[in-house]
Image (tube, rainbow, N blue to C red):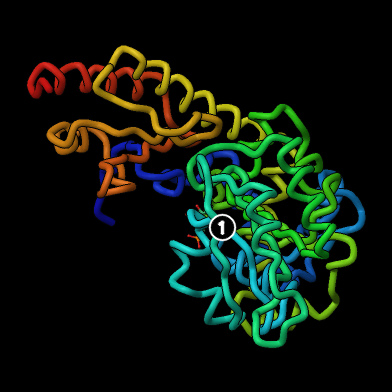
């Protein structure tokens, strides 16, 4: 096989490879035969591990990607005549190719966001024409934690949103593609951001956090449904060699790797943001609370910086970049990038 040389960058946490301990665990599972579709011993142990973190009153269902996790969580909470409330920055809205609308068949109602977060006031504002047969009925609230802009809802903010949701009998879904980063930022266990709040469904990410592939749909309490397995199969999201998906989560949760990775990637983002303080030409656009740094930079700096490390232009109108760290981002890589910034500033003064 040809050899490839991949260089580290800030493109996304799914640009990185597989965490060595996850890869090792996959290797350790790669012998003999085991039952498929979740009927294996590894999946049983992984489920026990999920219950240790999220409590006994849950069901866990694995799927292949985050879009499917979001769509299936919400599909299980609403009917096609319902509406789902989410932020105008939600991955659900901007980056899922209308999969929620296509597969669920219902309306997304976009709420204004500040630093990626929506407010209880705006949720309340959307609760109109309830019972009116001409109007799609708001039934679910989808929050992203951390948000798409790298910010984290505080526990108080979450309680306030849950209170409005309860008042209007809204089901609550959390897109937790990077939930461990939020838990680490707030210094709380995963249950504090999910079970203890009384949410209904969680998309729990794996791929962004060092796994090869795989996400978990977790349904809580009143929203557990035995027929979810049919929804997943119909959506073509039932992994057959399940032990290789569940086994990754087993290692991730059992050994504390979830916390280790989230601590590291969050710290790397903070270090990068601190290093930017010397650059008055750069504006940090949102509080850095997880593993993403959003910056507005002078346009001529973009290409030379991208030659050093790839990243995405997040917002072409305001020329905002997203610099994202990962489990394998190193302090040396950050130093090199900050050095490159100095050089680019010398060559392209603004
Ligand atoms: C917040 C969030 N949710 C969901 C997803 C969807 O993940 P996938 O690309 O695996 O469908 C992503 C991916 O970037 C994401 O950032």
Residue 258 visible in the displayed image: no
In which quadrant of the rendered view does residue 349 lie? top left
Q: Residue furthest left?
A: 347
Which quadrant does the C terminus fall into?
Answer: top left
Query: Can you say whether 156 is above or below 30 in the image?
Result: above
Residue at 24 percent of width and 17 percent of height: 339
Residue at 17 percent of width and 36 percent of height: 299
Q: Position of residue 180 (x, y in %)?
A: 65, 39
In which quadrant of the rendered view does residue 305 lie? top left
Q: Residue furthest right?
A: 56
Query: Can you say whether 189 is above or below 316 in the image?
Result: above
| Secondary structure at numbered mark 1 | strand
Residue at 9 percent of width and 24 percent of height: 348
Q: Position of residue 268 (x, y in %)?
A: 47, 25
Residue neighbourhood size for the residue with mark 1, other residues' Cα within 10 Å, grouped as few (<14), some (14–19), many (≥20): some
Q: Nearer the viewer, residue 48 or 293?
A: 293
Residue 344 visible in the displayed image: yes
Q: Is residue 136 left or right of residue 296?
A: right
Residue at 35 percent of width and 43 percent of height: 11
Q: Residue furthest top?
A: 278
Q: How many marks?
A: 1
Q: Position of residue 155 (x, y in %)?
A: 75, 36
Mark 1, residue position: 111
Q: Position of residue 126 (x, y in %)?
A: 65, 63
Q: Is residue 225 left or right of residue 308?
A: right
Q: Cβ(mark 1) to ligand 1 < 8 Å?
A: no
Which quadrant does the N terminus fall into?
Answer: bottom left
């Amino acid at each position: 096989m040809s050899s490839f040389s991949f260089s580290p960058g800030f493109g996304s946490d799914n640009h990185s490879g597989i965490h060595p301990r996850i890869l090792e665990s996959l290797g350790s599972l790669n012998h003999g035969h085991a039952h498929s579709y979740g009927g294996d011993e590894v999946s049983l142990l992984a489920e026990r591990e999920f219950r240790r973190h999220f409590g006994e009153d849950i069901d866990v269902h694995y799927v292949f990607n985050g879009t499917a996790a979001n769509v299936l969580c919400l599909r299980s909470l609403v009917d096609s005549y319902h509406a789902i409330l989410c932020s105008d920055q939600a991955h659900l809205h901007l980056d899922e190719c209308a999969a929620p609308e296509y597969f669920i068949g219902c309306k997304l109602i976009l709420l204004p966001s500040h630093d990626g977060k929506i407010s209880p006031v705006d949720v309340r504002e959307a609760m109109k024409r309830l019972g009116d047969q001409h109007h799609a009925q708001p039934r679910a609230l989808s929050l992203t934690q951390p948000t798409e802009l790298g910010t984290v809802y505080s526990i108080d903010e979450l309680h306030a949103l849950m209170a409005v949701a309860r008042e209007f009998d809204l089901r609550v879904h959390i897109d937790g593609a990077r939930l461990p980063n939020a838990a680490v930022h707030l210094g709380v266990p995963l249950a504090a951001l999910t079970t203890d709040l009384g949410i209904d469904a969680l998309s729990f990410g794996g791929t962004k956090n060092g796994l090869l592939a795989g996400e978990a749909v977790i349904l809580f309490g009143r929203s557990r449904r035995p027929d979810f397995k049919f929804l997943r199969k119909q959506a073509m999201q039932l992994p057959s060699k399940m032990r290789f998906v569940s086994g990754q989560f087993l290692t991730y949760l059992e050994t504390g790797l979830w916390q280790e990775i989230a601590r590291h990637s969050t710290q790397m983002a903070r270090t990068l943001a601190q290093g930017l303080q010397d650059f008055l030409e750069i504006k940090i656009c949102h509080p850095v609370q997880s593993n993403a740094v959003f910056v507005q930079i002078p346009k001529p700096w973009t290409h030379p910086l991208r030659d050093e490390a790839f990243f995405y232009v997040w917002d072409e109108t305001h020329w905002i970049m997203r610099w994202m760290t990962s489990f394998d981002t190193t302090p040396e890589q950050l130093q090199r990038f900050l050095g490159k910034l100095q050089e680019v500033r010398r060559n392209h003064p603004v």
